[in-house]
Amino acid sequence: MSARTPFVAGNWKMNLDRAAVHALCRHLAVLAAEKPPSRLGVFPPFVYLADVVAELSGTGIVVGAQTCHSRESGAYTGEISARMIRDVGASHVIVGHSERRQLCGETDAEVRARLDAALAAGLDVILCVGETLDERKADRTAAVVTGQLQAGLAGLPADTIARRLTLAYEPVWAIGTGLNATPAQAQEVHALLRARLAALAGDAAAQRVVVQYGGSVKPDNIAALAACPDVDGALVGGASLDFRSFAAIARLGASAPRPAGSDR
């Protein structure tokens, strides 16, 4: 059994143009050749997904989509299926991102349907959970994040959870706001999530799952976050669009040894 390898993933959201995407990919390929201590991933907009897969082929950088539909095909104008994502060579998909939950009204049931579709298509999944500012102020953080986790994973085989899932804790109040959870706040929630994972899938599986932090991650806060024993890298938003910032996060995002788990 090897240590969990922290996973630093860039969610590009609805940003960049084709020229900027290709320039960023060229820089990322150089970064990957340095073999930073963190596993790397990028999640471009759908229209650039095949380009990024081709650009980063052979680098070891994970390429995935930002969401997927729950159906394999059909009359769903504007939607993209997990099978299509897999077909262009991507290996991962994000489900349950707070912006999808908040702006697109995705319910826990819809998030679970997308997760199931992704797994069925052969994609690995980053499942996002997190509370709003009002929920934190109401002391509902634990109830919200464990409820989202339960809805997302209940009934899945322990081996599937251990090998095909990454969990991302993203406090909604810290996304794009310049605020971020303190290392103590992040560790508290990450430890809670790992304990709930153990209840769902057993301790061995829970210790294998990488749990990222997401919420205004920057080079100046990643090292302190990464030093927390249950914080395994980051899901990076705005800072992932700037190569120097993302590279710094990748280099600093594995500053503490991880407990026995799995290189995934």
Image: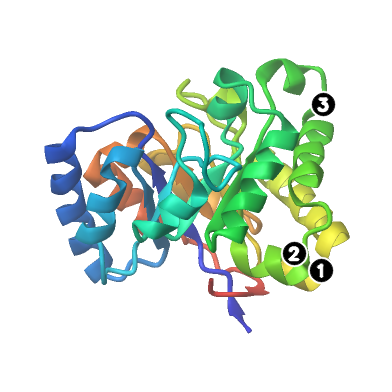
Which sits in the foreground, 172 or 147? Answer: 147
For image coordinates 23% across by 45% down, the residue present is 243
Marks 1 and 2, Cα distance to the nearest angstrom?
5 Å
Looking at the rendering, which quadrant does residue 36 occupy? bottom left
Find disc 3 in the rendering and name its residue.
Answer: 140
**Mark before the other along the chain sequence, 1 or 3:** 3
User: Residue 156: image x %, image y %?
Assistant: 78, 60
Q: Secondary structure at mark 1?
A: helix
- How crowded pointer 3 is (Cα within 10 Å; few <14, some 14-19, many 20+) is rated as some
Amino acid tagged 3: Arg
Note whether residue 106 is visible: yes
Q: Is residue 123 above or below residue 168?
A: below
Instruction: Please count the marks in the image.
Output: 3
Q: In the current view of this chain or complex, which residue is farthest to the right?
A: 199
User: Residue 78: image x %, image y %?
Assistant: 42, 29
- How crowded pointer 2 is (Cα within 10 Å; few <14, some 14-19, many 20+) is rated as many
For image coordinates 72% across by 42% down, the residue present is 189
Q: In the current view of this chain or complex, which residue is farthest to the bottom?
A: 1
Looking at the rendering, which quadrant does residue 138 occupy? top right
Q: Are marks 1 and 2 in contact (CB under 8 Å)?
A: yes
For image coordinates 39% across by 58% down, the residue present is 87
Looking at the image, residue 144 sits to the left or right of residue 86; the answer is right
> Which circle marks residue 203 in the picture?
1
Q: Is residue 226 above or below residue 33?
A: above
Marks 2 and 3, Cα distance to the nearest angstrom?
23 Å
Find disc 2 in the rendering and name its residue.
Answer: 206
Amino acid tagged 1: Asp
